[in-house]
Image (cartoon, grey):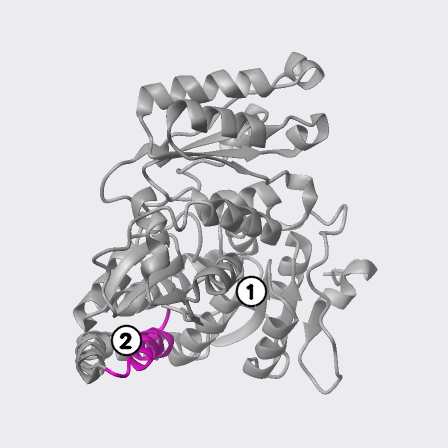
């Protein structure tokens, strides 16, 4: 088989760890023609805001943009499910020529009357940026008439990368913060930022903190509520899980309200435990919180440890490729896979920065490929060359894995079970083991191996 070549313009964003020094290039717009796995600005904003379950979400643009719905990226709710609807102004040729502001105005009035949301988010798409609709003015007018926050999300897809969509979402969220009453919020209180409750993770994490004796004021944005977000400025600490999407909001809250923040990960035994201990140490003047944390960590690990040891025997020496949205997630995955006895042959992200990739270099073994904003050709190349047994990624990486004849684990959009927390680590290990050791792989033509 002929070697798969990399586009020369992409070489500065790919690094194979070895003796040769390399400075990773990142934060660039995707290369035209490379069919990037990275999503657009609009997609990034929807990732952050869509899980707010009692808000109206309306896409101002062509109907095709509204295809990015709840069913593509799940976000579970314990109550209202307004976020499961995907509304669009469905802009067409006449709207592009004459403008879509009136259409947006009447759509908002109709939807607010029909569903009585706590707030509304209006997402600007590419065409809106081109024709120049004043979305902010329409939102302000409707907000005054209906008495609820109507927030423009400036997420025109062509403006940048998925990270710019995160920032647009954070800017919209920040307009809500500070509007609520903080009376009754305790001294030992936190906001959980960057947890989107795709498989119920927010409920697991919230339960851990509450068992520690820490009050959770809001989760932004998994199973989120507008009223909780409005009073989130009353919390004593922000705990940032998805650093790529929510650090911008945490920094804004620190500047305006003086709320400190820490970065954590809820995936894997080590990082999950650190996430609890770091919060306990922040509230060090209350030793009871730290004692409860020790008990939780001990009990939770003890309950899953025997099962993990059996799985490790089956997975020892297997090879995994990781390609995820944020680099911080890749750090936790590398630790978790090593704990299971697996080798990481590729680690990449859509939104990593220079600091993230420096840390990835330190964490990865010799020969591991580190890649920023990959495309299907590159992922296929290294899966074949490094003889991977598994790809861990999202909805767009699944077809690559199956075409290559290897296992796949969804760590992003479509999964139905939680992968965070201690129970999540067991779920992850079991899913990886089922996928990698499935007897179906003995029928693949690319290589022959006894299973």
Position in image of residue 237 (x %, y %): 36, 68
According to the image, label 2 marks what residue?
308
Asked whether residue 205 is in view, the answer is yes
Crowdedness near tag 1: few (<14), some (14–19) or many (≥20) residues, C-alpha within 10 Å: few
Position in image of residue 297 (x %, y %): 23, 78
Position in image of residue 80 (x %, y %): 26, 36
Q: For the residues marked 2 and 1, what is the alpha-carbon distance in whole angstroms?
A: 28 Å
Q: Quadrant of residue 427?
A: bottom left
Crowdedness near tag 2: few (<14), some (14–19) or many (≥20) residues, C-alpha within 10 Å: some
What's drawn in magenta, residue-wise?
Answer: 267-285
Which residue is nearer to you in this view: 19 or 101? 101
**Residue 269 part of the magenta segment:** yes
The circle drawn on residue 362 is none
Q: Is residue 177 left or right of residue 127?
A: left
User: In the structure shown, which secondary structural element does the residue marked by tag 2 occupy?
Assistant: helix
Magenta stretch: helix, strand or loop mostly: helix
The circle drawn on residue 447 is 1
User: In the structure shown, which secondary structural element does the residue marked by tag 1 occupy?
Assistant: loop
Asked whether residue 437 is in view, the answer is no
Which residue is nearer to you in this view: 148 or 37? 148
Q: Is residue 412 above or below residue 18?
A: above
Residue at (53%, 48%) from the top-left corner?
171
Q: In the rendered view of the protein, which quadrant contains the N terminus?
A: bottom right
Q: Nearer the viewer, mark 2 or mark 1?
A: 2
Residue at (51%, 57%) from the top-left corner?
245
């Amino acid at each position: 088989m002929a070697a798969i070549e990399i586009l020369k313009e992409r070489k500065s964003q790919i690094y194979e760890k070895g003796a040769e020094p390399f400075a990773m290039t990142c934060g660039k717009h995707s290369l035209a023609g490379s069919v990037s796995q990275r999503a657009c600005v609009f997609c990034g904003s929807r990732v952050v805001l869509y899980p707010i379950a009692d808000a109206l979400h309306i896409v101002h643009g062509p109907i095709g943009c509204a295809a990015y719905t709840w069913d593509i990226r799940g976000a579970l709710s314990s109550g209202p499910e307004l976020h499961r609807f995907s509304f669009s102004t469905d802009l067409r040729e006449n709207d592009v020529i004459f403008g879509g502001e009136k259409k947006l105005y009447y759509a908002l009035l109709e939807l607010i009357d029909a569903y009585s949301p706590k707030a509304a988010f209006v997402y600007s798409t590419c065409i809106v940026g081109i024709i120049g609709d004043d979305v902010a003015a329409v939102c302000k007018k409707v907000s005054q008439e209906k008495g609820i926050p109507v927030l423009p999300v400036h997420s025109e897809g062509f403006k940048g990368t998925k990270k710019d969509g995160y920032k647009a979402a954070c800017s919209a969220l920040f307009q809500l913060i500070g509007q609520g009453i903080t009376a009754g919020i305790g001294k030992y209180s936190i906001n959980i930022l960057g947890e989107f409750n795709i498989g119920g993770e927010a409920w697991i994490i919230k339960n851990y903190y509450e068992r520690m004796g820490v009050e959770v004021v809001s989760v932004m944005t998994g199973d989120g509520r507008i009223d909780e977000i409005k009073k989130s400025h009353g919390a004593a600490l922000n705990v940032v899980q998805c650093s790529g999407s929510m650090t911008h909001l945490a920094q804004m809250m620190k500047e305006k309200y003086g709320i400190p923040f820490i970065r954590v990960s809820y995936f894997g035994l080590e990082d999950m435990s650190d996430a609890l201990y770091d919060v306990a140490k922040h509230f060090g003047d209350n030793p009871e919180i730290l004692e409860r944390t020790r008990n939780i960590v001990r009990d939770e690990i003890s309950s899953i440890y025997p099962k993990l040891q059996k799985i490790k025997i089956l997975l020892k020496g297997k090879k995994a490729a990781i390609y995820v949205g944020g680099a911080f997630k890749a750090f936790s995955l590398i630790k978790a896979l090593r704990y299971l006895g697996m080798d990481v042959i590729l680690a990449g992200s859509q939104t990593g920065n220079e600091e993230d990739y420096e840390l990835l270099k330190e964490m990865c073994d010799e020969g591991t490929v580190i890649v920023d904003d990959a495309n299907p050709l590159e992922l296929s190349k290294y899966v074949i060359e490094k003889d991977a047994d598994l790809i861990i990624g999202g909805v767009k990486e699944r077809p690559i894995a199956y075409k290559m004849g290897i296992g796949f684990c969804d760590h992003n959009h479509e999964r139905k079970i939680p992968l965070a927390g201690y129970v999540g680590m067991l779920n992850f290990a079991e899913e990886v083991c089922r996928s990698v050791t499935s007897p179906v792989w003995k029928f693949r033509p690319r290589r022959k191996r006894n299973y």
